[in-house]
Image (cartoon, rainbow, N blue to C red):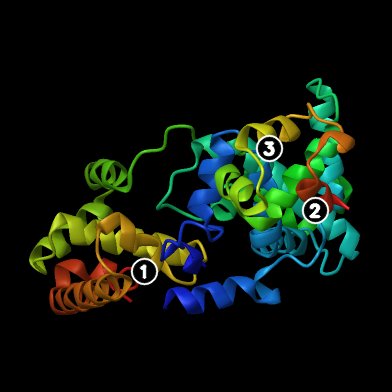
Amino acid sequence: MNQSTRTSPPSDQPDVSVETIMARLVDGDTAAVFTLYEHHGHRVAGVVRRQLRRCGLDRIAPEDLRSLVLDACMELLTVAPSWRPGGALPWWWAEGRIRAVVNGWVGVYADSIDDHGQSAEETDPYHPPADEDTVAETFARLVDEVPLVGLVAEAAREARIDQTILLCLLDYAIQQDQGDPSPAHTLAPRYGVSPDALRQRVSRSRKRLRAVVADDPRFAPLVDFALVA
Amino acid sequence: MSPEQLACQRRHPSARWPFPPEQLRSRVAQALDLHGAGHADVAASVLEARGSSGLDPEQFAARHGVGVALLARAEAGELALVDLPSQLRRLLS
């Protein structure tokens, strides 16, 4: 998504970008809930449907879906102050909250036995972090704590990928993993480049990283990583 | 993508959730009522009209030729339907 965030509309034109809507919600502008519902409700519905499918429900009545989307939008209103522009889209970022809404509607008896593998995840209610680490902080911490992440950092050094580009690469992969259909557009404002330039930068860095990983046996454990695939 | 293309994309029916927000309006009206708004239904309808337009208060007020302060009062539930200027009343009917 985020096509709506690429260009600022003229001052008399509506700005229905996610960033603007979330900023208005944070400012206490209740009208923005209607904007969110009407202009991005179909995207929220995607997250709702996904969770319904997890609960074994492939089809529900349109009025029920509408009601769930509405509840999900009200949840987004609640968590709006914690959302940060430039990160995951609000409905993916608050997926845990939306899942809780859907689970509450479906009820515990709708959980199939096959879902019990996820029980630990389900029983621990998800709360979006109020103060999440930046990607840079998290990555720096993981480099020290997780050997494989340290290996990624080392491979990046070998490939002459500097820290900023590497973080951009990670951000890009995170956005892709979270279902963002156009990570370049989401991340371009954060890195101060055009979406095309960012896409090119990511592609080149990925190629260099892939080459280093393929050539050096030290980096064999990284061969299957999505980051270099 | 050019601004014109973006505008077209935003206007396209597929870029909208197809269900009208009546349910949301009544939910918002309830919330406003709980917070002591005198005319919660009117306020929710005005909020819906502005929210659906995607405009901020200044833009919306300018587009419909009403004052921002009056719009704020209407959205806060301080004005009855009969007290709204005709430009706003028309939007709600």
Asked whether disc 3 touches disc 2, contact meaning CB atoms under 8 Å apart, the reply is: no
Could you say which quadrant of the image residue A163 lies in?
bottom left
Asked whether disc 1 touches disc 3, contact meaning CB atoms under 8 Å apart, the reply is: no
Point out residue A33 in the picture as x, y percentages from the top left corner.
68, 46
What residue is disc 2 on? B91
For mark 3, does the 10 Å Cα neighbourhood hold few (<14), some (14 to 19), or many (20 or more) residues?
many
Nearer the observer: mark 1 or 3; the answer is 3
Residue A119 in sight from this viewpoint: no
Image height of A226 relative to B30, above or below: below
Q: What is the spatial separation of the Cα atoms under label 1 and label 3, in whole angstroms?
A: 38 Å
Secondary structure beneath dot 3 equals: helix
What residue is disc 1 on? A184
Q: Residue at x 60, y 43 (%)?
A: B57
Chain under numbered label 2:
B
For mark 2, does the 10 Å Cα neighbourhood hold few (<14), some (14 to 19), or many (20 or more) residues?
few
Numbered circle sitting on residue B71: 3
Chain under numbered label 1:
A
Same subunit, labels 3 and 2: the answer reads yes
Residue toward you, A125 or B42: B42
Is A173 placed left or right of A55 in the picture? left
Nearer the observer: mark 2 or 1; the answer is 2
The quarter in which the C terminus of chain A is drawn is: bottom left
Secondary structure beneath dot 2 equals: helix
Chain under numbered label 3:
B
Could you say which quadrant of the image residue A131 lies in?
top left
Same subunit, labels 2 and 1: the answer reads no
Is A210 placed left or right of B69 in the picture? left
Sequence-wise, the earlier of marks 3 and 2 is 3
Secondary structure beneath dot 1 equals: helix
Numbered circle sitting on residue A207: none
Residue toward you, A57 or A201: A201
